Image: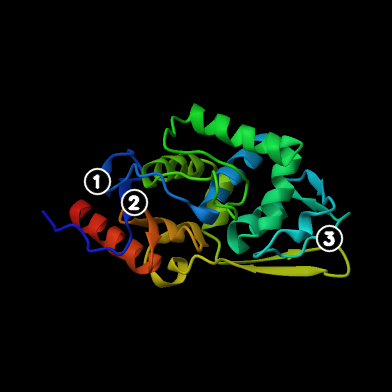
Amino acid sequence: MASPPPLGAGSAILVDGTTGTVLWGRNAHERLPIASTTKIMTAVLTLEHLRLDHEVVIRRGIRLIEPFREGLRPGERIPVRKLLYGLLLFSGNDDALALGQEVGGTNEGFVRLMNAKAGQLGLEDTQYSNPSGVVDEGNWSSAWDLAALTRYALEKPRFRAIVATRTKSVTWPAPTYTKVYVNKNHLLTTYAGADGVKTGWTTKANHCLVASARRHGIHLIAVVLGSPNAYRDARRVLDFGFRIRG
């Protein structure tokens, strides 16, 4: 049996993405701030409630969401499919709020839907307070729950395709005309077989990463939370998984 990987992360898990079997974990049920990995749930609810061609009218106040925002303008009419690229590749907090308000009517209404969905999926370590993860207060989950949520999300073809996308060029209303989104998940270009999923960072949460990779018919999901170097930790967890599954 291979030795468990040395990690900087305080909490981590390795899951067989096909069967859901937990292969290894460290403090996997510890409730921690999860930063922008929150957006996985936002994407799930968006895909379950809105058509991809549904146009979202950007409301006033959306563009004020800092620090990571793509600069949505009030009055713009943007199809859901385009906002999802901003949400999951660029990790725009304004995209998260725009989609959340469209699904839930209000930010509070969407948060209620997020927590109801977490309950439906049996995510007992999870509580949401906002659709983006930009605010840590009252917003937490665990490596275990994020892995379970990610398996559920990856069953959706559109989600699976978006998180595996390295760059995406989309048309946009004038005066922008075109936007190019570059995925913040560097594993897609540095780790063989990587095909998702979501990065996250706040001062309180430190670096968080939900990673998916496939090799030779083996699908693994790794989650690392509270890491000083989430990419290094995720690579070590995935390497460990492919060794013991190979």
Q: Which mark is residue 73?
A: 3
Q: Give the side of residue 45 with respect to residue 219, left or right.
A: right
Residue found 70% across the figure and 34% down from its top = 109
Q: Give the side of residue 77 with respect to residue 144, left or right.
A: right
Residue found 29% across the figure and 47% down from its top = 27
Q: Give the side of residue 166 with respect to residue 78, left or right.
A: left
Q: Is any part of residue 218 visible from this angle? A: no
The CA span between labels 2 and 1 is: 9 Å
- Outermost residue on the bottom side: it is 190
Q: Quadrant of residue 195?
A: bottom left
Foreground disc of the pair 1, 3 = 3
Foreground disc of the pair 3, 2 = 3
Secondary element under disc 1, as helix, strand or loop, is strand
Q: Amino acid at mark 3?
A: Arg
- How packed mark 1 is, by other alpha carbons closer than 10 Å (few <14, some 14-19, many 20 or more), is some
The CA span between labels 1 and 3 is: 45 Å
Residue found 70% across the figure and 49% down from its top = 97
The CA span between labels 3 and 2 is: 39 Å
Q: Which mark is residue 220?
A: 2
Are the residues flagged by discs 2 and 1 in contact, CB closer than 8 Å? yes
Residue hosting label 1: 23
State the residue in front, 112 or 152. 112
In the image, is residue 106 above or below residue 218? Answer: above
In the image, is residue 68 above or below residue 61? Answer: below
State the residue in front, 102 or 125. 125
